[in-house]
Image (cartoon, grey):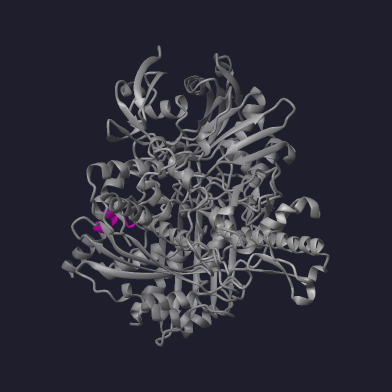
Amino acid sequence: MSQLKWVGTRPIRPDGVDKVTGRARFGADFSMPGMLVGRVLRSPHAHARIRAIDVSKAAVLPGVKAIVTRDDFADQESVFEPAGEVTVNFRDMTRNIMAREKVLYEGHAVAAVAATSVAVAKQALKLIAVDYDVLPHVIDVVAAMAPDAPLLHEEMITRGVDPAPKTPSNVSKRSEFGFGDLDAGFAAGDVIVEREFTTKPVHQGYIEPHACVASVSADGQAELWCTTQGHFVVRAYCARLLGMEQADLRVTPSEIGGGFGGKTVVYLEPLALALSRKACLPVKMVMSRDEVMRASGPTSGANVWVRMAATKDGRITAADAVLKYQAGAFQGSPVEPGAMCAFAPYDLENVRAVGYDVVVNRPKVAAYRAPGAPIAEYAVESVVDELAKILAIDPIEFRLMNAAKEGTRAAYGAKFGSIGLIDTLEAARDHDHYKAPLGPHQGRGMASGFWFNIGGETCVSLALNEDGSASLTLGTPDIGGSRASLAMMAAEELGIDYDKVRPSIGDTAALGYNFLTGGSRVTFAAGMATVEAAREIVTEARARAAKLWEIPEDAVTWEDGLVKPAGDNAGKFDPLSLADIAEIAAKTGGPIAGYARINAQGAAPGFGTHIVDVEVDPETGRVTILRYTAIQDAGKAIHPSYVEGQLQGGAVQGIGWALNEEYIYDADGRMENPGFLDYRMPVASDVPMIDTVIVEVPNPRHPYGVRGVGETPIIPPMAAIANAVENATGIRFTELPMSPPKVLKAIDDAAAAAGGA
Amino acid sequence: MAKLHVSCTVNGDEVEFLCAPEETLLDVLRDGLDLTGSKEGCSSGDCGACSVLLDGRLVCACLVLGAEAEGHAIETIEGMADGDALHPLQRKFLEHAAIQCGICTPGFLVAAKALLDTNPDPSEVETRYWLAGNLCRCTGYDKIVRAVLDAAAEMRGTDHVAT
């Protein structure tokens, strides 16, 4: 590849000025004339049958323009349909956006109103009478699997078990991955470690609540503005739930104030459309933080059992795991990706991971950054650390002895291509951080992580404007700087300045289908499509020059942003820039634009290794993060600052998951900490600078070598911190979060046990 | 209950508005005055996305009633740049890529300006504690803290650059 001019540099992002001046419009910043306010009535119960809903008093309240309940949504067939990397079941989806037979969690939507003001809408909600038959509930995953547990779905028969069970349960599905002979593998080991871990649900914690404005006209055509990771997905879901043609619904994404997977589903959007359709006026709906916490998807809490064996000389001989994940109120936890990822960093001959997807009376989980993987790999990376310690082998060396590499058959079945796990481990081993001295009560830990990354359906349009500038239209909402990296690739290909490429996110009418921003796919897949569209422009530019010069197309070359005659034989003509070509476009055949529509294949896995130093205060149990280094294979960092940002942000989310974040429920299944004060996410004073090392093992399937980077960084922190705490205290924690009360109790218990011995 | 008539200044301009007694300053700014740069992340003063200055003091606009603005000077993110000349903090946030999604950015900028107005040479620790009232879920704070320290250095006229 020739010298790169833009790829690998750090220009200012194109949407940057709007974001530092307050001009950028996020979900709740959009308004329309005559707009109504929509509000949702939510269940106060964790589990109850709805006997009746009486809206008659609310309906006659002056200012109330529409009310919707379960009666306003057609039921859907229970079919599991692929939707990008996930599977959806519209029977469940329609029940999640609006309860039908039962409410299945506190916060479950029961009715929605549209009114002329917030005050009227709130008053109307109070006038809606719901007759509930309260049922026993279950929120713990192990309790939900018990034979006598209250059933959320009386008809649910566990899938993936042969023969199928005769009786219903809360277990939606059993999945198993692996190969080899586990008994032989465990027999071959000199040491075996077996541990059981529990993790709590954690919320994606985006600062921007869900928000939308819907406007349905009398002829059924509708517009929807919303904050989402995927407006084409929103269109598909809403059209299905509301019985609309997709072409009749135009969805425009706002700027998005964080998502991390949590804005890949619909909550308010179908309700706002249904209300607008009934009221024949635009309806705006915005969730409160309380609603975000009680009713939008966290990721699973889980129970994970791991057993691994190794020989004295450091070879892992067997690995076995059972993972039980909370799905929330409807099936579909990320236990399958969790089970597939659990042992993926290792080259194993005998491996098995069994997953159980379990419904409980909590909000339906949504994707959260590498869904399922952080939980599974936390457990495995803790056990791997313990094995290394027993064998007296450095934990990085132990991982290097067993690391997956090109050609390794992954535990989930696929054979790895070119991957960078070993590179990240070696970078960690050689980093200053790994050798720095530690003080009293301090410990160091490390852990690695793996995530698949995806490609998927993508359309991009790139227009060469008459003045030689270029307009890049994308269908993947920009959540962390992707407009910059995609414009950089376009500039690189077109040989024009980055500032001459203006990227924007088009609505659902502007482009063909785009799967959502997720799976760490955008810089990879939309990058691939952008490059393809740019190359189409270059090909066309050569054709136009050939026409102008009256020479064959293959006698025209493209070099350093100029079209030139291929050699003296082709004729003597002055080279033309794209601006020159654009100027004569009308005379040489009309407008010039590239359009790529691809189903991007070849997304390469992302591996990362993190090192962390902690200090544990024996008086309070507080764990302080002293130093943190995140290392990851990015394939190729298009804009290194935003790659670093992904590593840093993922690490700090992981710190929150490890040390503080958890849902706390009362005995009635009601969430007790639905706000940022008590659901404690890391703040600036909780963390140090997060050092980063970007390793670049190119992905051969991408024109610039890109691998996705956004999700992997949240995988290693929990185990790395648990391993560091173990080194600081001698205590192996198997429960998250390691919050001060739990750490203090463990320290006190250990001291009492030592004193009593 | 009748609406209240309130006079104040917003970003130096005299402003009059009517607001219900229970409406917050944030409601007034966003819904009444169309100044949507201040964001609503929690409505409980925990996220700092609605940070504004009230007579130069850093407050969460969601914890101030609209009626309490009477006679006071309010500064929001919309008033931070001088025309097309960005404030050094705004420039440094761009240069350091201290933004990912950008929803918390206005609040961080207003809070950081309040810090530098009172302490032109904050340490990293002082900066981190001052900004502890502003939540960012994307960046892990690293680049935000560096941007603030770098802006402070530039505003002091030193060539110290946080690395």
Magenta span? A738-744
* Residue A741, magenta (yes or no): yes
Count all numbered tags in the image, as a single digit: 0
Side of A2 relative to A390 (left or right):
right
Side of A193 relative to A474 (left or right):
left
Residue extending farthest left: A755
Side of B25 relative to A263 (left or right):
left
Near-viewer residue (B4 or B70): B70
Position of residue A355 measured from the top left corner of the image (x, y, whole percent): 54, 62
> Would you say the magenta stretch is mainly helix, strand or loop?
helix
- At horizontal 64% and vertical 70% (from top left) the residue drawn is A701
* Residue A446, magenta (yes or no): no
Residue extending farthest top: B2
> Could one spot residue A590 in this view of the protein?
no
Near-viewer residue (A703 or A692): A703
Near-viewer residue (A374 or A610): A610
The correct choice, above or below, for A54 with respect to A75 in the image is: above
- At horizontal 51% and vertical 21% (from top left) the residue drawn is A117
Tell me the quarter of the image containing the N terminus of chain A. bottom right
Position of residue B112 measured from the top left corner of the image (x, y, whole percent): 31, 45
Position of residue A83 measured from the top left corner of the image (x, y, whole percent): 66, 52
Tell me the quarter of the image containing the C terminus of chain A. bottom left
> Could one spot residue A716 in this view of the protein?
yes
Side of A244 relative to A723 (left or right):
right
